[in-house]
Amino acid sequence: MGIQTIAIAGDHASPELKAVLAEQLRAAGHTVLDLGTNGPESVDYPSFADAVAAALADGRANAGVLICGTGIGISIAANRHRHVRAALCHTPTEARLTRLHNDANVLCLGARTIGVEVAKDCVATFFTTEFEGGRHARRVAMLG
């Protein structure tokens, strides 16, 4: 995927993991657009999925990372947007395959279900894996 601007956001379960991942992305040379939240006060995860989707739509970001407690709700919310291909990943293998085969543009993670080191491995893999194209391109085109 190369160097890019990555929008990152999450709900109240996300701030600690989000901060670690944002620093990792910056260290890899990416620009990070942090769209919140940054505290433990209860917030609604669909709002943060919408914020990342808007950043992708208007060109402020090329890709995104979304985090909630399990990653499930925020991935559902993100995928309501036609231009978003959000994938919930628990392993670097899933992160690699969703880029290779699905051309995912948003990585979703569960702050309460994945360890920090595995999350970092998923991020590193997601943002260094290119879409394979070929037979997968037809299927991806059907999504958007």
Image (cartoon, grey):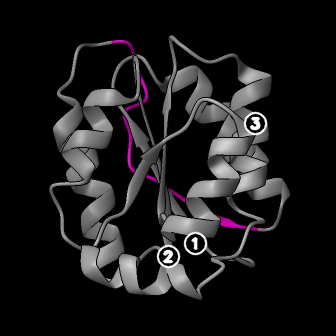
Q: Amino acid at mark 2?
A: Asn
Numbered disc 3: secondary structure: helix
Q: Nearer the viewer, mark 2 or mark 1?
A: 2
Q: Is residue 94 left or right of residue 28?
A: left
Place of residue 83 in the rendered image (x, y in percent of width and height, measured from the top left): 27, 74
Residue 37: in magenta span: yes
Q: For the magenta stretch, what is the residue range?
A: 30-40
Q: Which residue is mark 3?
A: 120
Numbered label attached to residue 5? 1
Numbered disc 1: secondary structure: strand
Q: Name the one closer to the observer, 42 or 97.
A: 97
Numbered disc 2: secondary structure: loop
Q: Earlier in the sequence, mark 2 or mark 3?
A: 2
Q: Is residue 109 left or right of residue 45?
A: right
Q: Are marks 2 and 1 in contact (CB under 8 Å)?
A: yes
Bin the neighbour count of mark 2 within 10 Å (Cα to Cα): few under 14, some 14-19, many 20 and up.
some
Numbered label attached to residue 18? none
Relative vertical location of residue 14 with respect to residue 128 in this rendering, above or below: above
Q: Quadrant of residue 138?
A: bottom left
Q: Which residue is mark 2?
A: 62
Residue drawn 38% across the image and 40% down it: 36
Cα gap from disc 2 to disc 3, whole angstroms: 19 Å
Q: Amino acid at mark 1?
A: Thr
Q: Quadrant of residue 30?
A: bottom right
Cα gap from disc 3 to disc 1, whole angstroms: 17 Å
Q: Is residue 3 left or right of residue 31?
A: right
Direction front: furthest residue: 135
Q: Is residue 5 left or right of residue 130?
A: left
Q: Earlier in the sequence, mark 2 or mark 1?
A: 1
